[in-house]
Image (cartoon, helix red, strand yellow):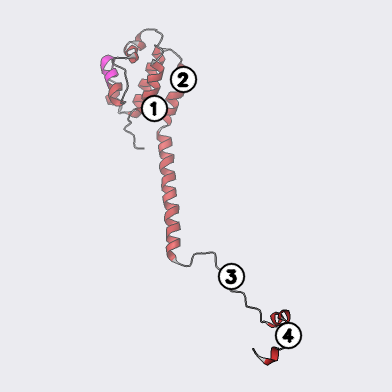
Amino acid sequence: MNDAYQGFSLVELIDLLNEVPAPPPVAMTPQTPGWFILALLFVVMAGWLGIGLWRHWRSNAYRRAALAALTAAGDDAAEIATILRRTALVAYPRAEIVPLSGEAWLNFLDQTCPGADFVSGPGRSLATAPFRSQTAPPELRQIAMDWVRRHRSVHPA
């Protein structure tokens, strides 16, 4: 130890120390261009996803309207048949839907929705519902709602 500091107490020696200079402040922005590119890519992907979800939501507006109409239709088989026909006209080419009636209409409903039971189940009443006043079977509105939710549309999502 140096003789010049003999006789000093530890506290006095600590007071003689020079203060360590503070380091410069750390920048909060990334210093490499890779982070900027990654952030830009993230913003573009989020925008693309947002636009895709918005288009999907808009393309299914007819489904939401049909489900609301089916809820309001109650057990009126003619009204349920009309709602299904209007929904099909929105989702499929008009030339394909307009000529369908009776058994062909029921087959179309079964083919466009996996698991639907229009030909042999309670949906059978749809073949004659528009032509005579009748109360729908209790399950008809439910299978109609299932068809509206699950049919495969030709519209791009």
Q: Nearer the viewer, mark 2 or mark 4?
A: 4
> Answer yes or no: do the residues labelled 1 and 3 have beta carbons within 8 Å?
no
Q: Is residue 76 magenta?
A: no
Residue closer to the observer: 150 or 15: 15
Indicate the secondary structure of the residue bearing disc 4: loop
Lower sequence index among marks 3 and 2: 3
Q: How far is disc 1 from disc 4 in space, using C-alphas?
A: 88 Å
Amino acid type at circle 3 is: Pro
Q: How far is disc 2 from disc 4 in space, using C-alphas?
A: 93 Å
Lower sequence index among marks 1 and 4: 4
Please tell me whether residue 36 is drawn above or below residue 150 in the rendered image. Answer: below
* Residue with the most extreme top position: 133
- For label 4, the residue is 8
Q: Provide the residue span drawn in magenta.
A: 101-107
Q: How far is disc 1 from disc 3 in space, using C-alphas?
A: 58 Å
Amino acid type at circle 1 is: Arg
Which image quadrant for residue 85? top left
User: Horizontally, is 7 left or right of 29 in the view?
Assistant: right
Residue at the (45%, 21%) spot, across then down? 69
Q: Position of residue 77 (x, y in %)?
A: 39, 13
Q: How far is disc 3 from disc 2 in space, using C-alphas?
A: 64 Å
- For label 2, the residue is 71
Say few, some or many: other residues with alpha carbon within 10 Å of mark 2 (under 14 / 14 to 19 / 20 or more).
Answer: some
Residue at the (40%, 22%) spot, across then down? 145
Indicate the secondary structure of the residue bearing disc 1: helix
